[in-house]
Image: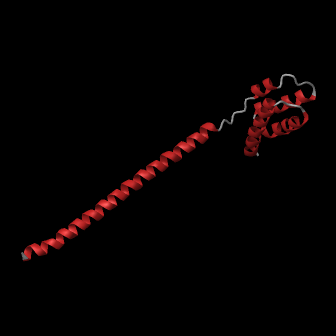
Amino acid sequence: MDQQNRLLPDRVAIKKDRQRRRAWYIALLTMKKRIISFVILTGLVCLAAIGCSNSKIDTAKVRAAFPSLDGDAKAQLEHGLVAIDAGNYVAAVKPLEKLSYEIKMDKKQRKILEDTLKKARAKAARQK
């Protein structure tokens, strides 16, 4: 009986130790799952941001949107689009901005020109 009483505290200690280790193991598994989920989610967000940033400027689309321009307005449009095609975005912004204030446009034309200007400004800022 005396020997059995001495073993009892050891059994309790062993059981508590196992419970602590199991709790740590579960906590580590949970943290590991969260870290993996965070890394995957961050990667997906980065891929989505990269995939959604269509930074190529489609000058043919802009030309097609303004078929009825003539005179000075057409010259400004061509000057801006030729500069974009040449990769000189700083020179392209001013004529396109001037054009956006001078001519009457419908909603579709305005959206195309504004998108083109936005992309040209962003590339011009990186070019400076």
- Residue 13 percent coordinates (x, y): 22, 70
Which residue lies most toward the left here? 1
- Residue 93 percent coordinates (x, y): 82, 39
Tally of marks: 0
Q: Is residue 66 left or right of residue 1?
A: right
Which residue lies most toward the bottom here? 2
Identify the coloring: secondary structure
Q: Nearer the viewer, residue 86 or 7?
A: 7
At x 73%, y 41%, the residue is: 123
At x 93%, y 26%, the residue is: 71
* Residue 105 visible in the displayed image: yes
* Residue 88 visible in the displayed image: no
The correct choice, above or below, for 7 with respect to 85 in the image is below
Q: Nearer the viewer, residue 87 or 54?
A: 54
Quarter of the rendering containing residue 95: top right
- Residue 14 percent coordinates (x, y): 21, 67
Q: Nearer the viewer, residue 23 or 50?
A: 23
Q: Is residue 20 left or right of residue 93?
A: left
Which residue lies most toward the front here? 1
- Residue 39 percent coordinates (x, y): 48, 48
At x 57%, y 44%, the residue is: 46
At x 60%, y 40%, the residue is: 50
Which residue lies most toward the right here? 71
The N terminus lies in which quarter of the figure?
A: bottom left
Quarter of the rendering containing residue 90: top right
